[in-house]
Image (spheres, coloured by chain):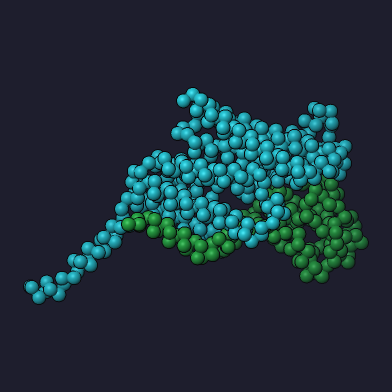
Chain colours: A cyan, B green
Amino acid sequence: MSGSGDRHSPAPAVLNDASKRAGFFLKPVPLSEFTFYLVGLLFVQYWAGFAAMLLSHLSAETLANEFAQVSVLPVIEWYMLFGFIRRVGNRPISPALAYGSLALIVAASVGVHHQRIAFLVETLALLAAWIAVPGLRRVGAILLMIALQHPQWLTPLHGLISGFDAQTVSGVMSLIGHPVTRTGNMIISAGMPDGMIVLAGCASSNLMVPMGLGLAVLLVASRDRLTGADFGWIGITLAIAFAINIVRLCLMLQSHAAYLSWHIGTGASYVSVGGLIVTLAAWFAATGRDEARA
Amino acid sequence: MISAFRLSCAAALTGFIALGAVRRHGDGPLADPATALVDHIRARGYDVSAPQKVLWGVPGIAISVAACPQPIDALVFEFDEIMSPGILAGVRAADPGILQVSYEGETFSTFDRAALYRLRLTNGLAEFVRTGQWVDPPVILLFWPAGCAQTSIL
């Protein structure tokens, strides 16, 4: 018996090591640590392509073609998100949820060959997995709203809105005494006798989505609970975004030079800067009222 | 001691970078579909020139075909753009030529929305499942001058 016991004496030690190793990965993960590292990973994934493009195609022309001033909003949103995750608390979450979330990100990154589409898929799945976990649910919602701001998958929506824009522009121009002729999305005016067409890229939703979702992210990350007034601020911001774009389209109809300026030139930059200022102003106004009350 | 979760995240990040994900997923400037069309048309032996009608900055070319006395205008639209309600009506009003639609190598004599969506869904999904990439070819509108017999030139 003793001989047999001697022959197998290392076995309990091996089992012990294995169980320790298993335990190493089976321990609950503190929520703050989980959120910080996972969101950090998503942050790298979200911005990696942008950084790579800046490094490989850095020129004023590329930047002007690819980015508008309102594109600054996601930078502020990520900053606010990292501020929010410092407040999520430190209760433990199950290793299944922690490592499952991580595995999901790895699988989407490897399987989907487009950074932003992978990010959208991940945020949808993560929100579904986190919906029952307080704190995480809000992180998931913020991530999804950031993902939805990317215009690529919103073109069908922009296409629908562009028709409404064309009708509104036609109505506004008639109202101010400059009647136009409209065929579908094409508008012919005295200043643009060849006509101007409102393509999806010119739809108001291109400004409404980043402004509305951007403000929603900033508000969700800034406070514990959204109030009725917050939805009012989001509604006002969306209305202003729509109005800004309608004015821009009306100005584009004045002449070919005006069209170029408000489409891709200085005027377009004014619109983008205006959108950024309005969003930040609405955020300050909404949160400033709380501070004043406090 | 570094926790297992931090180690796992670091490993995922290292793998993400080592696998070239940054390069592979880079949001570089989009390839110009009009340039690709010009190359394709020239490879098929047709002459290409500037379009007779430039519509609202939409990329376009004119293609000379032997059987046609005048060049054929070709406009290159993003799929979602041309599918937007109200766009085709404007395009038709601006360019009255006889319309031919080319998408993914198939040619239609009318603007058949349902058929275009079917093609996009089946081909797009098949490509996505095969490569993980969503490829979205442009819709090319050809405007044939009156009196020309339409053929498949793309």
Q: Identify the residue at image location x=64%, y=61%.
A: A56
Q: Identify the residue at image location x=82%, y=70%.
A: B45
On the rendered structure, is B98 left or right of A4?
right
Q: Give the quarter of the image for residue A102.
A: bottom left
Whether residue A44 is visible here, answered yes or no, is yes
| Name of the residue lying farthest toward the right | B69
Q: Which of B152 and A105 is in front in this view?
A: A105
Q: What percent of the width, then of the height, locates residue A221?
A: 49, 38
Q: Identify the residue at image location x=59%, y=56%.
A: A51
Q: What percent of the width, then of the height, locates residue A39?
A: 47, 49
Q: What percent of the width, then of the height, locates residue A290?
A: 50, 27
Q: What percent of the width, then of the height, locates residue A21?
A: 29, 61
| Name of the residue lying farthest toward the top | A293
On the rendered structure, is B120 left or right of A198?
left
Q: Identify the residue at image location x=87%, y=55%.
A: B52
* Number of marks in the rendered image: 0
Q: Which of A14 and B65 is in front in this view?
A: A14
Whether residue A148 is visible here, answered yes or no, is no
Residue B110, relative to residue B106: is it above or below? Answer: above
Q: Quadrant of the N terminus of chain A?
A: bottom left
